Amino acid sequence: MTFGERVSTLRREKEWTQKELARKIGIDQTYMSRIEADKFDPGLKLMTSIAKAFRLTPSELIRDVQQSRHSH
């Protein structure tokens, strides 16, 4: 699972639109779309904001992403 897929999955579980999540973390919906499409690599600060929006730690947010990389 890529980081973008992880964010998209969590967002859909919360039944949030990209625009809603973008507003919660203070970015434009266009950036959120690019993050979910893996066309934009968020820095640590933005990744931390995304994690907080989902009430996760940054490590919890990227946990499945890391496991996916190790399994290939």
Image (cartoon, rainbow, N blue to C red):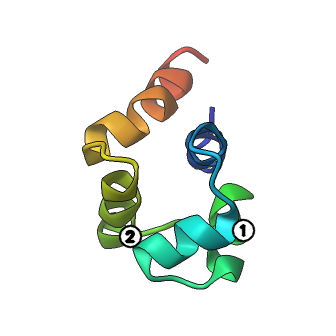
Disc 1 + disc 2, Cβ < 8 Å: no
Image spot of residue 35 (x, y percent): 63, 64
Identity, as a three-letter code, of the amino acid under mark 2: Leu
Quarter placement of the N terminus = top right
Asked if residue 61 lies left or right of residue 11, the reply is left
Specify few, some or many for label 2: CA neighbours under 10 Å numbering under 14, 14-19, or 20 or more. Answer: some
Asked if residue 60 lies left or right of residue 35, the reply is left
Quarter placement of the C terminus = top right
Asked if residue 63 lies left or right of residue 72, the reply is left
The answer, for residue 31, to whether it is visible in the render is yes
Q: State which quadrant residue 40 falls in.
A: bottom right
Identity, as a three-letter code, of the amino acid under mark 1: Ser
Front residue of this view, candidates 50 and 24: 24
Mark 1 vs 2, N-terminal side: 1
Specify few, some or many for label 1: CA neighbours under 10 Å numbering under 14, 14-19, or 20 or more. Answer: some
Badge 1 marks a residue whose secondary structure is helix
Q: Which residue is outermost to the top?
A: 71
Q: What residue is at 44 percent from the left and 82 percent from the top?
A: 26
- Compared with 67, 3 (above or below) is below
Q: What residue is at 52 percent from the left and 78 percent from the top?
A: 23
Residue named by callout 1? 33
Image spot of residue 69 (x, y percent): 53, 28
Image spot of residue 38 (x, y percent): 68, 57
Image spot of residue 17 (x, y percent): 69, 61
Badge 2 marks a residue whose secondary structure is helix
- Compared with 68, 11 (above or below) is below
Residue named by callout 2? 46
Q: Which residue is outermost to the front?
A: 15
Q: State which quadrant residue 56 falls in.
A: top left
Q: What residue is at 56 percent from the left and 43 percent from the top?
A: 14
- Compared with 62, 7 (above or below) is below
